[in-house]
Every structure is written in structure tokens, then in C-alpha cells.
Image: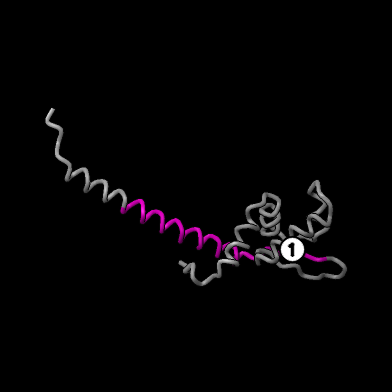
Amino acid sequence: MVAVAEYSDEAVDRLFRALADATRRDIVRRTLASELSVSDLAGDYEMSFAAVQKHVAVLEAADLVAKIPRGRERIVRAKPETIRRAQELLGHFEQLWRGRIDRLDTLLAEDDEQSPSDPS
């Protein structure tokens, strides 16, 4: 499990902000399956080529994809290691919350054991 302290708050914010948008998540999903040119990506969305380029730039800044020049085209390739990092970070947060819930359950159980029974 990765320690959250290994990543700056800015990097974590960039990562999850990038994944907060449905179009960007779809671009990541599609480029995990196969490398695609920005032109190929843009053809499948009802937005301008420039808008798709901006989405790709956000994903690139979050290290979720890389753009590789191939001739005149720019090929977009997902970076699975960054997806794994996001999973590890979420797993870390899940462990924290599960630990807190377990401690709360323990405290409530102890409180129930110490409460006097109702004589009625």
C-alpha cells in the first residue's frame, strides 16, 4: 500500500480533478484499451477538436496519459501505473475510514455493555 505522504497534495488534486470529468474518464478508459490519436478521440465526442485537446492536456498534467508524436499525429496512451496509484490512494483512505468505523463500533459496544438495563 502506498503512503499518501509520498504524493503532494497538488498531485493528488490534479489526479482526482482530472478523473472527476466523464469525458476524461472515457478517454482514459479508451486509451487503456488501445492507443488512439487525438483526432480519433475527437471524432467520437460532440465537442470541438480543441476541447478534446484540452481534456487530453488535463489528463497529461495529471500523468494519466502520455502524448507521443507519431508523424503528424499525436498518439494518446494511458499510463496504467498512475491508475494503480489512484487505486492505492483510495485504498489508503478506505482503510482509514474502516478503522474509524471499527473504533466507533467498539466504543458503542462498550457503551452498551456499561449502560444499566431498563428495569421496566
| Amino acid type indicated by mark 1 | Ala
State which quarter of the image contains the N terminus. bottom left
Secondary structure type for disc 1: helix
Question: With respect to residue 41, does 84 lie above or below?
Answer: below
Residue 76 among magenta residues: yes
13 with respect to 112 (left or right):
right
Location of residue 23 in the rendering, given as x and y in whole percent from the top left corner: 71, 51
Q: Position of residue 54 (x, y in %)?
A: 77, 59
Residue nearest the viewer, comparing 26 with 7: 7
Residue reaching furthest to the top: 120
> Which percent across, then down, holds residue 107?
26, 50
Span highlighted in magenta in the image: 74-103
Q: Residue at x 68, y 63 (%)?
A: 78
* Quarter of the figure with residue 37: bottom right
Residue 80 magenta: yes
- Residue at screen point 47% across, 69% down: 3
Q: In the figure, 95 relative to 5: above or below?
A: above
Image quadrant where one finds the C terminus: top left
Neighbours of disc 1 within 10 Å: few (<14), some (14-19), many (20+): some
- Main secondary structure of the magenta stretch: helix
In this figure, which residue is indicated by the disc labeled 1? 57
Q: Does residue 18 appear left or right of residue 92 in this picture? A: right
Depicted 20 relative to depicted 116: above or below: below
- The structure residue drawn at horizontal position 74% and vertical position 63%, both measured from the top left corner, is 57
Instruction: Determine the residue positioned at 41% across, 58% down.
Output: 95
